Amino acid sequence: MFGFILFWLGRLSNVTGKRVLRSQQALDPGTREVAAKVFEITIFVVVFLLLLNVVGTDLTALAVFGGALGVGLGSGL
């Protein structure tokens, strides 16, 4: 039940955020769409991580993997 509420709130904030970003006339149309897509992905990743935390999944391994991935990408770039 909590997961349903969490995803519903995420979707609501996603729709509202995309509407606000797309109404910004100071940005180029391409920039507005990219910002809206990045916002959408960020919202769903945060909701997914919160849901994993609520279910009881240990996020330590995910944090270590993310750190190693960041070091690898940083070295590669």
Image (cartoon, rainbow, N blue to C red):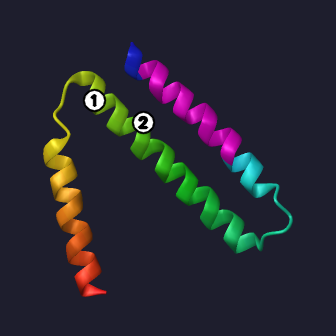
Q: Residue at x 71, y 65 (%)?
A: 32
Q: Which residues are magenta?
A: 4-17
Q: Residue at x 70, y 39 (%)?
A: 16
Q: Quadrant of residue 59?
A: top left
In the displayed structure, does residue 38 sit left or right of residue 62? Answer: right
Q: Quadrant of residue 13?
A: top right
Q: Position of residue 3 (x, y in %)?
A: 38, 22
Q: Position of residue 31 (x, y in %)?
A: 68, 71
Label 1 is placed on what type of residue?
Answer: Asn
Q: Is residue 70 above or below residue 1?
A: below
Direction bottom: furthest residue: 77
The residue pinned by badge 2 equals 47
The residue pinned by badge 1 equals 53
Q: Position of residue 2 (x, y in %)?
A: 40, 16
Badge nearest the viewer, 1 or 2: 1
Direction top: furthest residue: 1
Q: Residue at x 36, y 32 (%)?
A: 50
Q: Is residue 70 above or below residue 15?
A: below
**N-terminal label among 1 and 2:** 2
The secondary structure that dominates the magenta segment is helix
